[in-house]
Amino acid sequence: MRFRRSTVLVATLAVLASGCGVASRAQNAGSGTEVPGIGSNPPSAPVGPIPAGLEKFYQQKPDWERCGSNQQCATILVPLDYSQPAGQTIELRARKVLARDRGGRLGTLFINPGGPGASGQEFAGQAPLLFGASLLRKFDIIGWDPRGVGESTPVKCLDTEQLDTMIAADGSPDNAAEIADLDKEAKTFAAACETRSGRLLPHVSTKDAARDIDVLRGIVGDPQLYYLGMSYGTYLGATYAELFPKNVGRMVLDGAVDPSITNEQMGIAQAKGFDKALDAFAEDCAQRSCKLGSSKTEVLAKVDQLIKDSDANPLPGDGDRKVTQALVILGLIYPLYLKDFWPRLEDAVADGLAGNGARLLALADEYTDRQKSGYADNSNEVNIAINCLDHPDFTSIAQIEANLPAYKTASPRFGEFLAWSSVSCANWPVKPVNQPHKIKAAGAKPIMVVGTTRDPATPYEWAVGLAHQLESGVLVTRDGDGHTAYLSGNACVKNVVESYLVQGNTPATDIKC
């Protein structure tokens, strides 16, 4: 999940594809049983009864058109409101990468890169470069933009200039005037979303998106679901398993979110996670006698100085935009998602201390999908819309102030930003539809949960929590740095995941890689 900051709430980055390697296959990690009913000739209709009133959606036949080498794209209709299936509809845009072994294909692997707000279509387009050969041979791989995201009837709120202002706003206000400014930004954003997307806002929850997945499963004719979800995509997958446990075939949840914890617990855990990741960066940097110092303490002190100085004195950026403290924070945490980006973090901090914020701004822009012409997608906006529906415990300004000490204790650097992230939903025009709770998914086949020990965005304890609460959960642990595991280059994780998805080999016990 993305770092949660002020009005850009839980803006989750699931996979940094540009830095993900594909490792060679390791030894077989375990054995288990095949999921029955899925073979080389998938049936043409979904298993079990179609929910009443949804027949036309499950039985629609999308027009899959070529949109790349061995790829097809289609638009699929789903109900705006599942309680009124005869009412308005919205569109989902999906991309399919065709299985290379057409005669021996197992079915369809649905993939979600996280967010909420990341494009599944783009993720699917990268699958031939990222995924293992066995997955590409045996599965059609479908990624779709979830409802409200990208090309799937998107949530729309602000123009580029307005969004620039919101993202750069002070996320650690020091006085009443700065708090009022932050609250004003949040109210302006909420009002704009209601004006431009009011019809859609009540219907972009994770439960709605999970119901969409079952429609997609029905359309392709798979009796049970193959699924690989990362970061927020694990929450989406776990929600699907809760709603449709008997429709779960093989499911991998990588970089897991624990659905039982509150928003405050989530924020404090993320604050600790990014502090832990920054410590690891500083230690690595010091061991190399990098530009920032020859000891961990020296490196961290320079980072702290950069954060402090940029609050009162924003850095010059690209000639048009100043690099405020909020953008410095985003520029610092983005490279912590992937160890391969640590050299970029070193250079950006060094430049920032020298009075040049261009590298920090570039990192922040990558994180928020800001391009020269504007934002590439609506991920920053829809992220807030989904999270405000999913999490009911967002608080008032008074409560945020009361919680600040706990956040600062968890992370002196990042805690305040995490605490103030709640201000967006405190002003949100739609009431939340969910409560934190344990997901057991009773009756589901084995579900593989993958966690990384030093994952800053989805801390390892979340994976442990989800694996333990799922009745059929199996935990795979990657000892390492960065966010998520399957695309990290860890051969052990890669083998375990692919052996499970392709061959049905479920580890008898939890595995450490």
Image (tube, grey):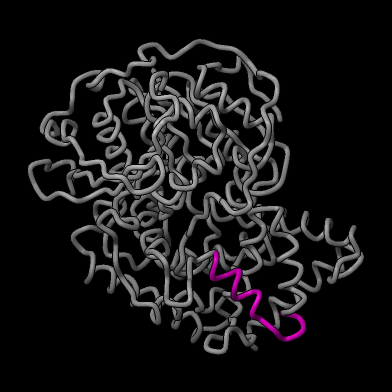
Give the left or right position of residue 428, taking residue 506 as reference. Answer: left
Q: Nearer the viewer, residue 168 or 470?
A: 168
Q: Residue at position x 55%, y 55% from top?
A: 267
Q: Residue at position x 39%, y 73% from top?
A: 186
Q: Which residues are magenta?
A: 352-366
**Taken as a whole, is the magenta stretch helix, strand or loop?**
helix
Give the x, y percent position of residue 490. Answer: 69, 36
Give the x, y percent position of residue 152. Answer: 28, 53
Question: Image height check: is 311 above or below 380?
Answer: below
Give the left or right position of residue 219, taking residue 267 as reference. Answer: left
Residue 361 falls inside the magenta stretch: yes
Q: Nearer the viewer, residue 269 or 55?
A: 55
Quadrant of the image occupied by residue 363: bottom right
Give the left or right position of residue 499, taking residue 243 as reference. Answer: right
Q: Residue at position x 11%, y 43% from top?
A: 84
Give the x, y percent position of residue 500. Answer: 54, 22
Give the x, y percent position of residue 290. Answer: 86, 66
Work out which residue is located at the far front of the displayed protein and give it: 69
